[in-house]
Image (cartoon, rainbow, N blue to C red):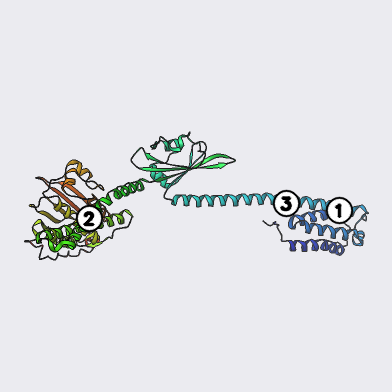
């Protein structure tokens, strides 16, 4: 920071030269006697004024000029009585002392102002850095807290508040929200509130209010060799742990479920290749049917696994207008060719609006639910597929006359890898088909359900919201194109 004067240095020096010369010229022009004490006081005051206005150099220059001019012949002729030899010396000493005092006072004042400026700049910088830090901390998805040595929480970002559900004032209120871990450890390492651990530590805990798993990481802030504060990072790892369990269960079942159809396909194809000519026609047909059935089972399993990987990986499902009645009718036509035309019936309400969803996902959900109904219902019964309008939604209901659902099955039917005791004995499977259906329907913004039917059997169904532009534009709904294979009578396909 540069020194500041009321006058710039060069103008002040020019004034310091002009003032003594002007005084001398004034005395000479007026030609009047001047009192020595008055002249000395005026000269000293002028020097001090110049020093205050311009600094030490204008003061020194004015002192030198006044001493020379008024001690010489000019001064001797005008003063009454004449100046003695001691007067210039006394004037010079007094002027120099005054100039030095003024300069010292101004330097002290300048240093005080400079210190104040630095303090203001430091406060502004601190506020800016704190605001920047709070913005960065607030934008972080993990919960971050700063706990002081006395146990008070001085900083807590919004993610931490959302995770805990409120903003505790002290660390005790935070500790009460977490249960001990499996090895008996408590949040904060079992230390007293506000006491910092000896080093960084990370442990996983479960919240007391629900089943969420939270990773608690503590980082002490060391000052003068002692931990005065600690930074706590809270990360919700519930979804990550669920995915890990899902992955482990998937890997444990995948090898068996993939090997079974592959063994049947490989064994049947090998047998046909080696001794197919020696087998009778019925045996060859049975082998081909087994190969086709197991290959189809393998294909469905791979499709479900691909969808499961995509949905669990966070890939979004498309949100586009789709004519649910067209898509479902096409799937039914394909499945009727596979399972027999008499096994599946479809009925569609007229004038249905487009829905919000993804056509590929709708096909997979419908196919999985129809396959599930055919697989677990007697061959003599019919699977009834109904596409109906609802309150701002279009519903697909798939009804069978199988063994139905128990209370336990209804509570867990959409969980991954869950298979009821009855269905597990009836047909093989990995237990992910219905789970995939649920994830796809929810990703499209819809709902899915499974309910037992009166008189036996089960109803599986899902509903998707009507495409919003249809209601805004009040466009006339498109009528479904009837498939020759699906049409029965009236509005039935």
Q: Between 176 and 335, which is closer to the camera in this rendering?
A: 335
Whether tag 3 and tag 2 are in contact, CB under 8 A, the answer is no
Nearer to me, 317 or 150:
317
Cα distance, mark 3 to mark 1? 24 Å
Is disc 2 placed on a helix, strand or loop? helix
- The front one of 22 and 244 is 244
Q: Quadrant of residue 466?
A: bottom left
Across and down, in percent, residue 472 comes to 23, 62
The quadrant of the image that shows the N terminus is: bottom right
Above-or-below relation of 371 to 404: below
Task: Label 1, secondary structure: give it.
Answer: helix
Residue nearer the viewer, 91 or 405? 405
Label 3: state its secondary structure.
Answer: helix
Mark nearer the N terminus (2 vs 1): 1
Q: Which residue is mark 3?
A: 107
Q: Quadrant of the C terminus?
A: bottom left
Q: Earlier in the sequence, mark 3 or mark 2?
A: 3
Q: Residue at x 41, y 50 (%)?
A: 141
- Residue 114, image x and y in percent? 66, 52
Q: Which mark is residue 263?
A: 2
Q: If you read the primary sequence from the N terminus, does the residue marked by circle 3 or circle 1 appear first?
A: 1
Using residue 2 as the reference point, say whether residue 45 is left or right of it.
Answer: right
Q: Mark 1 = which residue? A: 91
Residue 333 at x, y = what percent?
14, 62
Which is closer to the viewer, label 3 or label 1? 3
| Residue 465 in sight in this render | no
Q: CA distance from mark 3 to mark 2?
A: 96 Å
Q: What is the C-alpha distance between the residues marked 2 and 1? A: 120 Å
């Amino acid at each position: 920071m540069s020194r500041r004067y009321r006058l710039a240095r060069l103008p002040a020096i020019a004034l310091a030269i002009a003032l003594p010369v002007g005084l001398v010229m004034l005395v000479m022009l007026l030609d009047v006697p001047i009192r020595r004490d008055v002249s000395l006081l005026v000269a000293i005051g002028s020097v001090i004024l110049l020093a205050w206005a311009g600094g030490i150099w204008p003061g020194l220059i004015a002192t030198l000029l006044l001493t020379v001019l008024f001690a010489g012949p000019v001064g001797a002729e005008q003063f009454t009585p004449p100046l003695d030899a001691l007067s210039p010396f006394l004037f010079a000493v007094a002027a120099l002392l005054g100039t030095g005092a003024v300069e010292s006072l101004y330097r002290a004042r300048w240093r005080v102002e400079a210190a104040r400026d630095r303090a203001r700049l430091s406060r502004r910088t601190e506020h800016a850095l704190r605001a920047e830090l709070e913005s960065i901390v607030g934008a972080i998805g993990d919960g971050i807290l700063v706990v002081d040595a006395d146990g008070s929480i001085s900083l807590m970002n919004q993610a931490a508040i959302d995770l805990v559900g409120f903003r505790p004032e002290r660390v005790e209120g935070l500790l009460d929200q977490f249960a001990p871990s499996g090895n008996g450890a408590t949040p904060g390492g079992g230390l007293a509130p506000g006491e910092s651990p000896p080093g960084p530590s990370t442990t996983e805990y479960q919240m007391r209010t629900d089943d969420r798993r939270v990773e608690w990481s503590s980082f002490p802030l060391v000052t003068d060799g002692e931990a005065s504060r600690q930074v706590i990072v809270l990360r919700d790892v519930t979804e990550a742990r669920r995915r890990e369990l899902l992955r482990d269960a998937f890997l444990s079942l995948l090898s068996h479920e993939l090997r079974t159809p592959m063994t049947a396909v490989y064994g049947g194809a090998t047998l046909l290749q080696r001794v197919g000519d020696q087998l009778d026609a019925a045996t060859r047909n049975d082998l081909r049917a087994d190969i086709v059935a197991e290959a189809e089972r393998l294909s469905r399993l791979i499709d479900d696994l691909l969808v499961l990987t995509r949905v669990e990986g966070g890939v979004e499902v498309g949100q586009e207008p789709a004519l649910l009645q067209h898509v479902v009718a096409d799937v039914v036509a394909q499945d009727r060719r596979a399972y027999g035309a008499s096994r599946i019936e479809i009925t569609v309400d007229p004038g249905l609006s487009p829905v919000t969803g993804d056509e590929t996902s709708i096909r997979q959900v419908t196919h999985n639910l129809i396959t599930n109904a055919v697989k677990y219902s007697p061959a003599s019964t019919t699977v009834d597929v109904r596409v109906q309008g609802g309150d701002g939604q279009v519903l697909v209901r798939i009804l069978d006359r199988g063994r139905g659902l128990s209370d336990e099955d209804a509570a867990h039917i959409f969980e991954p890898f869950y298979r009821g005791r009855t269905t597990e004995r009836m047909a093989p499977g990995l237990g992910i088909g219905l789970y995939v259906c649920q994830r796809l329907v929810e990703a499209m913004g819809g709902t899915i359900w499974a309910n037992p039917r009166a008189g036996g059997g089960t109803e599986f169904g899902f509903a998707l919201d009507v495409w919003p532009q249809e209601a805004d534009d009040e466009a006339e709904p498109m009528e479904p194109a009837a498939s020759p294979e699906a049409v029965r009578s009236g509005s039935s396909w």
